[in-house]
Amino acid sequence: MSEIVLDGTPVGFVKSYDYPQNGHMANTLSPSDIGTHADGWTIEGKVWSDYYEWVNEFTASHPTHGKVWGDFEKKVFAESQAGFDDFVKHHPPSEWDYWDI
């Protein structure tokens, strides 16, 4: 765990999860993940489109599990292991091939 500081003020501790770059393979969220869900997660992010639609950077919050944010192709941060685990259980990243677009 490491301390996160925003504008010089400590805002808590997070654990980061590194995801390997797999050449031309993508690990992204689906546009259908954007919004508020019955599982309690509210997810925001920009939808990219080029034959296929995907979400790279995202921010997600849950009333019990806290926040998860980042980019599954680079690094994802979570306020807790339990929050990360619940998020990917309900909203796992999709793997697809950038060369297909």
Image: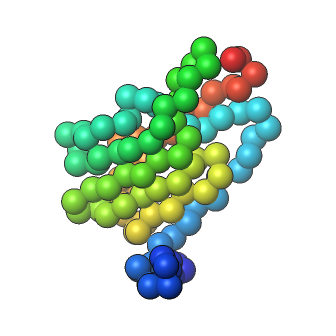
In this view, the residue farthest toward the top is 51
Q: Residue furthest right?
A: 23
Q: In the image, 94: left or right of 18?
A: left
Instruction: Give the residue displayed 23% in from the left and 62% down from the top.
Output: 64
Q: Is residue 89 visible?
A: no
Residue 16 place in picture, x, y as percent: 56, 66
Front-lying residue, 71 or 89? 71
Residue 55: image location, x then y, percent = 51, 36
* Residue that appears at 56% across and 23% down: 49
Q: Quadrant of the C terminus?
A: top right
Q: Depth check: 35 or 85 in front?
A: 35
Q: Is residue 10 left or right of residue 51?
A: left
What x and y, as percent, mark residue 56?
56, 41
Q: Is residue 83 above or below residue 60?
A: below
Asked whether, in this view, residue 99 is left or right of residue 52, the answer is right
Q: Position of residue 63 (x, y in %)?
A: 22, 60
Report whether 98 appears left or right of 64: right
